[in-house]
Image (cartoon, rainbow, N blue to C red):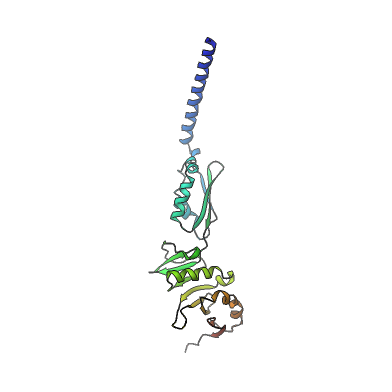
Amino acid sequence: MLMALKKRIRISKNGLIFLIVFIIIIIAYFGSPLSKVRNINVEGVNDLGAQQVINATKIDDNSVLLDLLIHHKSITEKTEKKLPSIKSMSIKTRNMRDITIQVKEYSTLGFINKNGYYYRIINDGHVINQKMSAPIGNYPTYSNFGTKRLKQIANLYAELPSNVQTNISEIYNSPTKLNPYRIKIDMNDGNKVIADMRTVKTKLKYYPGMAAQMKKKGVIDLEIGAYSYPFKDKK
């Protein structure tokens, strides 16, 4: 009986010692640089900057790694809210102290100019309410489009062949009494296109071939038929 009691006391003491040592280790760990993030790597960014993503997460070298693992879902949700062009993101650890932020962005469909600032247009014509002094990348700008028509033309642009997309500089809404769907397009190669929103997706695929046959820069009219003519010489 006495031996059993001594044994239980010894086990209790050992357990208490273990608990104290464990607490000391935990305190030492959280008080040391080993608990903090060392390196932050961002993968998958396209139009967003890596630092822009890091700033939105508020993760830095003072962030505790365990805290990030516990609250990663909340951090992800807040970051996606700050940067609507992020479709999805995840935070993963590497080498115990390094983290990798993996980002998947919505495709950029162009920019719209409002009051001297540019706003990015992403999937389904959604306009991100974030001012930019100038557009970035090789994307078109849209002018004079209302909300509904902007969504339509942005989605049409998304379905164009890539070699045509990269040649589009600016798209103008240019309706007439006879054709409320009329648009004009400035191309990066110096030509201009007149088209109808209802048929532009089908007809623009012929643009590269028509442009190659032109001896001078000019207008390619795709509104009704498909023909081209050179710009008038300036006198």
Residue 59 in view of the camera: no
How many numbered dots are placed on residues in this image?
Answer: 0
Residue 24 coordinates in the image, percent (x, y): 47, 29
Residue 20 coordinates in the image, percent (x, y): 47, 25
Farthest residue to the bottom: give it: 235
Q: Is residue 10 above or below residue 175?
A: above
Q: Is residue 72 above or below residue 141?
A: above
Q: Is residue 163 left or right of residue 22?
A: right
Q: Is residue 204 above or below residue 20?
A: below
Residue 83 coordinates in the image, percent (x, y): 45, 56
Q: Is residue 4 left or right of residue 148?
A: right
Residue 111 in view of the camera: yes
Residue 39 coordinates in the image, percent (x, y): 52, 46
Farthest residue to the left: give it: 115
In depth, the one of 194 and 59 nearer the eye is: 194
Q: Is residue 47 above or below residue 8?
A: below
In depth, the one of 25 and 39 nearer the eye is: 25
The residue at the point 52 percent across, 10 percent down is 2
In depth, the one of 47 and 155 nearer the eye is: 155
The residue at the point 49 percent across, 26 percent down is 19
Farthest residue to the top: give it: 2
